[in-house]
Image (tube, rainbow, N blue to C red):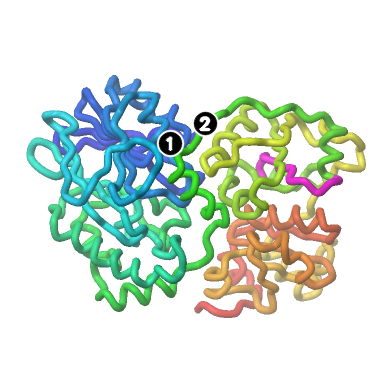
Amino acid sequence: MDTPKEPEQQVGGLAVEVIETSSLGDRSYLATDGEVAVVVDPQRDVDRVIAAAGRLGVQIVLVLETHVHNDYVSGGLELARLTGADYGLSAADEVPFDRRPLSDGEVVEVSARMRVRAVATPGHTFHHLSYALEGQDGPVGVFTGGSLLFGTTGRTDLLGEQHSEDLARHQHASARRLAANLPDGAQIWPTHGFGSFCSATQASGDSATLGEQKRINPALTLSEGEFVEQTLSGLDAYPAYYAHMGVQNTSGPEPLDLREPARAEPEELRRRLEHGEWVVDLRSRKAYVVSHLAGTVSLGLDGPMATWLGWMIDWGAPITLLGESREQVGEAQRELARIGIDKFAAAAVGTPKELAADPDQVRSTPTATFGDLAAALSGDPNGLPAPEVVLDVRTNNEFGARHVTGAVHVPLYELKDRLDEVPTGAVWVHCGSGYRATAAASLLEAAGRTVVLIDDMFDAAAQVDVPMTGGS
């Protein structure tokens, strides 16, 4: 379970605790004067936030949302209910539940020593607000949500491509408004940009001040036209489950339910696999390739499992979780609940041998490095099936930047619906590091294909003389 990021940051007599959700690339924040606290953009599993407040000995009196989130189900409404705190979000967002509507320039006096000021920063969404945190001597930082991130900004196409250019222009103006109205020493506390697909481009760094961003952030160094062009040209696909997050957050998410799913016995698992249901192996890919049940999909908890499962499945499809322990299944439940998947067909715990109804169900996957691929392409597969197809399952932008010459490209999130486009013959599949390729290999194996998993860093390919196209 992701925990508060230590240590807390001390600024102007106030403390700001970072609560990291690394699996989704997001952060939530708890700011306190030592007695009361304000929470910004909490994830759905608010027990982490309540635990942080309890450890610090502070009372949560205000919960704020910078925007209606598209990449996770918010815990803000439930946190406010549980703590009795005010729940603040943009007055322009129409919602069916009680909240404190906030507008540009409005100041909330949290205590005699701490207040927050709403700043309209449209761009990531039309009604986006940032919140300047002010101590007794003035502003000390700003919670920027999906506006100004570390070295980039939030993407501008989540409300539809027809709005992306208009929102990109707003995003440029909003970043400059923050830079003009807050001191250079003000800390920036963004929600997105730590691997989240809500980021327009890859963020850089772990902390920053406005002054530092003025030197490196494209929104603050490029003209409006240059920024818009760069932002729009860099946008790639984003997870399909995003389409469901805004709807849930606008209507008011249900409280979190982490009760254990029904336990599936081996015969039930076999039946579900035979019906083509999603049976997800949560172990690491290293464990998966050694031994797994045929037909299962590898999405280990050592990577962004929730993002890729949420992206690949048909929404509402039955899911069965397989783990080495009850704790592993519980961790997967928590991660998936953050994106609104909280009802499961079943779960099972044990080794593949223990979970198999028949010994023939247990399989292994051959693995290779890019060095092995180079040798195989030169005629020496070293006992592995000769590569008749090299399949690249990275994103469009990754493939366009550089790829193995002659590789077939099908992004992982499209693979289950495009399996018939993968040419016949033995498939050597790769991604950027091995995680997505393992998921792809499991899908290909389930479809009856002969697969070799390239479990290696993509940067190694050029170093071992694999023929490459693009790049330098």
Give the percent coordinates (x, y) of residue 54.
34, 21
Q: Secondary structure at mark 2?
A: loop
Residue 8: tell me if it is visible.
no
Lateral position of residue 46 relative to residue 304, left or right: left
Residue assigned mark 1: 75
Q: Is 24 above or below relative to 158?
A: above
- Is residue 275 a member of the stretch shown in magenta? yes
- Residue 193 position within the rendered picture, expressed as x and y whole percent measured from the top left: 40, 54
Q: Could you say where residue 381 lies in the image, as x and y percent from the top left?
A: 81, 67
In the figure, residue 400 lies in which quadrant?
A: bottom right
Badge 1 local density, few (<14 within 10 Å), some, or many (20+)?
Answer: many
Disc marking residue 256: 2
Within the magenta stretch, is there residue 318? Answer: no
Asked if residue 368 is positioned above or below residue 420 in the image, the reply reads above
Image quadrant where residue 179 sits? bottom left
Between 93 and 348, the one lying in front of the other is 93
Q: Nearer the viewer, residue 129 or 384?
A: 129
Question: What is the number of the mark on residue 387?
Answer: none
Report which quarter residue 351 is drawn in: top right
Q: Which residue is nearer to you in this view: 131 or 20?
A: 131
The region drawn magenta spans 274-284
Is disc 2 in contact with disc 1, using a CB cutoff of under 8 Å?
yes
Label 1: element kind:
loop
- Give the mark, 2 or 1, whose residue is nearer the N terminus: 1
Kind of residue at disc 2 = Leu
The image position of residue 168, as x and y in percent, is 34, 68
- What residue is shown at x 24% (from left), y 54% (from top)? 120
In this rendering, position of residue 307 left or right of residue 172: right
Query: Could you classify mark 2 by the number of other residues whose Cα lies within 10 Å: few (under 14), some (14-19), or many (20 or more)?
Result: some
- Identity of the residue drawn at 29% across and 39% down: 88
